[in-house]
Image (cartoon, helix red, strand yellow):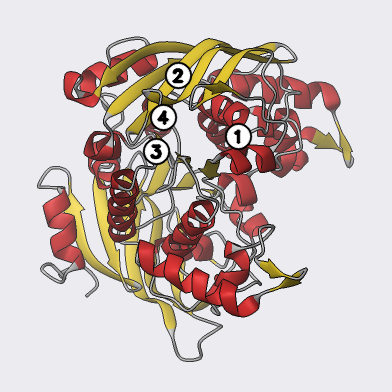
Amino acid sequence: MPEYILEMQEITKSFPGVLALDRVSFRVAAGEVHALVGENGAGKSTLMKVLSGVYQKDSGKLLLEGTECIFRGVKESEEAGVAIVHQELNIVKNLTVCENIFLGNEMKRNGIIDWEHQYLKAKELLDMVGLQVSPATLANELSPGQQQMLEIVRAINKNVKALIFDEPTSSLTDQETEVLLTLILKLQRQGVSIIYISHKLSEVFQIANTVTVLRDGKTIVTKSIRDIDEGELIAYMVGRELTNLYPESTHQVLKETALEVQDWSVINESIPGKMLLNKISIHANRGEILGIAGLMGAGRTELALSLFGAACKPVSGTLKINGQEKKIHSPKEAIENGISYVTEDRKKLGLVLNNSIRANIALPNFNKLARFGIINNNKEIQEVARFSKELQVKTPSIMQLTRNLSGGNQQKVILAKWLMTDPDILIVDEPTRGIDVGAKYEIYTIMDKLAAQGKCVIVISSEMPEIIGICDRVYVMNEGRIVGELNKQECISQTEIMRCIQGGTTDANS
């Protein structure tokens, strides 16, 4: 058996106007965890799509166990033993766990699906990965972490030799992440070769044996994880030394209150008597970056949506903007009152992926771009181009489809469209989820500049280092309540945040 189970030699792939992969070489040893890292747009996903048969390479060779292969589709790559677990889940939620596992690969006897055999095999696979659910459970009843594990079970069922994970933990809790990483190491011990793509470098150092860096569509370096540290790895990724993960603060918190919420309660309409938010009282000043921390399900996004007039209906409480009480019943009214909201799910809720950058940025700004109900095309192009330039969206044209942008540039497009509304209060939910370290720095810089202009920026993030690194003050939420308030001048730390969540500090709105 050859030393390398998989080799990609001098792979080149281009799209109109873009050279996505420039003679990239990448190889994976049998039974290793090989991390593939790089900034958004570096070529990681394109390379994996070539490997899995989604794209056809322009030139180069692909060898699997020493034999040259040409995959003309995903089915061919899976039959050869290469499977991918995507960041965006591909399960069918109205089918059962068992049906999802065998979808397109059903076990049959005399041309008829053998349901009993499938059920027993599904239970065996679920037990193997430690997923304690019945094969008869509907997929939509699973948590995000369980759905991710179901994707892995589907891949394992295809007798996989090389398993690709593309940002698998971006929507998982810390506990679910640990379960997944433990499973990956278990698969490795069973002889499965793992390709692991993640922007979370702590995960890379936790499980990888080898790391390869791509930058601008080229292979930069391949090293044993023992021979590289995080600073060196980041330098390879961004092409320069990044001495600080967070920009130096240039803003100053003003004494003027931009937003004030008192006794803000929101009912859970699907569960009578259940409160999503329970008597929340917070305030945010102009020129301040305010953090909202807490575990998944704490009510952070529900708070943001209710303030933005979307999805949740306030039961009681008062909202004041610049000292004046307001009643906001829709996103349109929120925008008119100077509030904008950047969603945590940019692909499903933040962007129209099949539309251009121009169309996406202009979408909430038609009132500014129209006269007598008619869009001024010249003004639209000028304004969109101006905001794209200010936020340094990397694109050959504002007519580029947003689906073809990297994650970091998609996030900049969402920020651009809401900044064009000229908000006084910008709520940003998971601002850097799934984007690379260099793009994160640029997003942090944008938020700092907004605060320096006297705007109020409210940041919701599951990344505690991010909250600590950029926020002036932090409210901690748990089970729909504010359980703590921390100030940068005193102490914002992961220990203090967790102490608040666990009930150690409940002096704010408790």
Q: Nearer the viewer, mark 4 or mark 1?
A: 1
Task: List x then y, in percent, for residue 282.
Answer: 32, 62
Q: Quote the CA–CA distance across marks 2 and 4.
A: 20 Å
Query: Which of marks 2 and 3 precedes in the sequence?
Result: 2
Vertical comparison of 415 with 28: above or below: below
Q: Quote the CA–CA distance across marks 4 and 1.
A: 23 Å
Badges 1 and 2: C-beta atoms under 8 Å apart?
Answer: no
Q: Secondary structure at mark 1?
A: loop
Q: Nearer the viewer, mark 2 or mark 4?
A: 2
Q: Quote the CA–CA distance across marks 4 and 3.
A: 21 Å
Q: How many marks?
A: 4
Mark 1 = which residue? 52
Q: Secondary structure at mark 4?
A: loop
- The C terminus sits in image quarter: bottom left
Task: List x then y, in percent, for residue 67.
Answer: 55, 23
Q: Which label sits on residue 26?
A: 2
Tell me if I can see residue 464 in this picture: yes
Task: List x then y, in percent, for residue 20.
Answer: 61, 16
Mark 3 = which residue? 194
Closer to the camera, 491 or 125?
A: 125
Query: Which of marks 3 and 4 precedes in the sequence?
Result: 3
Q: Around disc 1, counting alpha carbons within 10 Å, would you say few (fewer than 14), some (14 to 19), or many (20 or more)?
A: many
Closer to the camera, 266 or 64?
A: 64
Q: Quote the CA–CA distance across marks 1 and 3.
A: 14 Å
Query: Which of marks 3 and 1 precedes in the sequence?
Result: 1
The amino acid type, in three-letter code, at marker 4 is Asp
The amino acid type, in three-letter code, at marker 3 is Ile
Tell me if I can see residue 312 in this picture: no
Question: Residue visible at 49% across and 43% down?
Answer: 424
Q: Quote the CA–CA distance across marks 1 and 2.
A: 14 Å
Vertical comparison of 106 with 234: above or below: below
